Image (tube, rainbow, N blue to C red):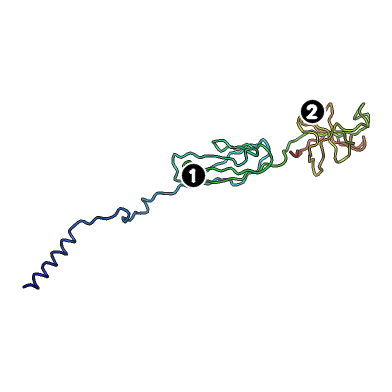
Amino acid sequence: MNRKLLITTMVFAMLFACLTPQKVNANEIPVSSGEQQLTPSIHLKKTKVSLERGDTAKLKAVVQNASGKKIIWKSSKKRVATVNKKGEVTAKDKGKTTITATISGTNISAQCLIVVKKYITMTVKTTGYCNCSSCAGKWAGSPTASGTRPKQNRTIAVDKNLIKLGTKVKIGDEMYVAEDTGGAIKGKKIDIYYSSHNKAKAHGVQYKKIKVYI
C-alpha cells in the first residue's frame, strides 16, 4: 500500500508541475528576424570630386533606415572648400579636403574627397606683339611691366586685374609667365610676346583655352 501511495503522489506532483505557469525572462524569448531593429546606413554617390576654384558641386547622400533624421555636412578644410546643409560644395582654393556626411544623433557617416585644382581654365582672345615701335609705341625696347626683359616662349601681357603679374599661364603645350601689361589688354585678352614683328603679326587673332595656375 505504501508503494502504491508513493507512486500516486509522484504522478500528481508531476501533473501539478506541468500545469503550473512558469516565469520566463523577457531576454530569453527569441525575437523573429522581422522584429529586429535595422541599423541606419549612409553612402555618397561620389567619393571623389575634382573642381576648379569657384566651381560648385552637389553631393548626393543615400540614407537607409534613418527616416526623419537630418544629414550633418562638414568640411575638414574650409579654406579649400565649404559645404552647406544641402550638400552643396564650393571650391575656394587649391588643395584637398574631406567632406563628411553624418546621420544626426549617430556616428554613422560617409565621406567624399574634394580636390581643388591648382589652376583655373578660361578661353581668351590671343594676339602677338614684339618690342618694336609698331607694337610697343613709346615703350619700344623697354622692360616689361614686371621689370624683366621680354622673352619669346615666356612673356605674355595680361590684364592684371584678371591675372596677377608673375602668374604662370599654360597656352597649348607652352608655359608662359604673366610679365607684361598693355593699354589694349583688358579682360580675357592676352598678348603673346615674339622676338620679331613678323612672328607677332603672323600670330593674328586666335581664341585659346588656357590654364591659369593659382
Name which quarter of the figure residue 7 lies in.
Answer: bottom left
Neighbor class of circle 2 (other Cα within 10 Å; few <14, some 14-19, many 20+) is some
Q: Secondary structure at mark 1?
A: strand
Quick one: quadrant of the C terminus?
Answer: top right
Neighbor class of circle 1 (other Cα within 10 Å; few <14, some 14-19, many 20+) is some
Residue at figure coordinates x 54%, y 42% from the top left? 101
Percent x, y for residue 128? 86, 34
Q: Is residue 54 left or right of residue 46?
A: right
Percent x, y for residue 108? 50, 46
How far apart marks 2 and 1 lie (CA) works out to 49 Å
Percent x, y for residue 120? 72, 38
Percent x, y for residue 115? 65, 43
Q: Secondary structure at mark 2?
A: loop
Tell me which label, 2 or 1, sits earlier in the chain: 1
Q: Provide the residue designation for mark 2.
A: 186
Q: Provide the residue designation for mark 1.
A: 63
The residue sitting at the front extreme is: 2
